[in-house]
Image (tube, rainbow, N blue to C red):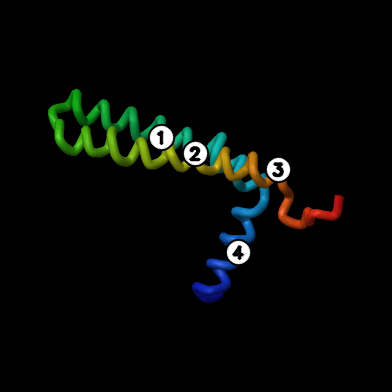
């Protein structure tokens, strides 16, 4: 399997609602929660700058990733990819 096949498989998976449900409602929120706890723990334990970076950058990246996946899933459920303007 080469990089082009992997890229095509990921693109195909991101056009289906099931993987987007898994990412948007389960995986990304869980990772955001874990990294928020890690960032707070780092701040409490005295590592203020790395803790703020984890808290403000990494946690927000997973949060926005979850919001993107939820929005993409809503769009795909409302407008399926195989659905043409046949009406």
Badge 4 element: helix
- Observer-side mark, 1 or 2, equals 2
- The tag earlier along the polypeptide, 2 or 3, is 2
Place residue 34 in its image quadrant: top left
Mark 4, residue position: 9
Which residue is painted at 15% across and 35% down in the image? Answer: 49
Q: Nearer the viewer, mark 3 or mark 1?
A: 3
Q: Dot 3 lies on which element?
A: helix
Mark 1: which secondary structure?
A: helix
Name the front one of labels 4 and 3.
3
Where does residue 80 sit, x and y in percent of width and height?
73, 50
Label pair 1/4, CB-CB below 8 angstroms: no
Q: Report the Cα–Cα distance between label 4 and label 2.
A: 20 Å
Instruction: Answer few, some or many: residues within 10 Å of disc 1's Cα (few below 14, many 20 plus, some between 14 and 19).
Output: many
Apparent side of residue 23 relative to residue 34 in the rendered image (left or right)? right
Circles 1 and 2 in contact, beta carbons < 8 Å = yes
In the rendered image, which residue does mark 3 sit on?
77
Residue for badge 2: 66
Q: Is residue 81 above or below residue 69?
A: below
Residue holding disc 1: 32
Location of residue 45 (image quadrant): top left
- Assess disc 2: are there few (<14), some (14-19) or many (≥20) residues with their C-alpha within 10 Å of its C-alpha: many
Marks 1 and 4 sit apart, C-alpha to C-alpha, by 25 Å
The CA distance from mark 3 to mark 1 is 25 Å
- Name the foreground residue: 79 vs 26: 79
**Closer to the N terminus: mark 1 or mark 4?**
4
Residues at circles 4 and 2 in contact by the CB criterion of under 8 Å: no
**Relative to residue 56, is residue 34 drawn left or right?**
right
Residue located 50% across and 37% down the image: 67
Badge 2 marks a residue whose secondary structure is helix
Residues under labels 1 and 2: Cα distance? 9 Å
């Amino acid at each position: 399997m080469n990089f082009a096949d992997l890229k095509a498989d990921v693109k195909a998976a991101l056009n289906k609602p099931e993987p987007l449900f898994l990412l948007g409602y389960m995986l990304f929120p869980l990772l955001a929660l874990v990294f928020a706890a890690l960032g707070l723990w780092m701040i409490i334990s005295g590592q203020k700058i790395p803790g703020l970076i984890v808290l403000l950058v990494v946690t927000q990246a997973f949060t926005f990733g979850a919001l993107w996946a939820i929005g993409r899933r809503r769009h795909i459920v409302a407008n399926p990819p195989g659905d043409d303007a046949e009406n």
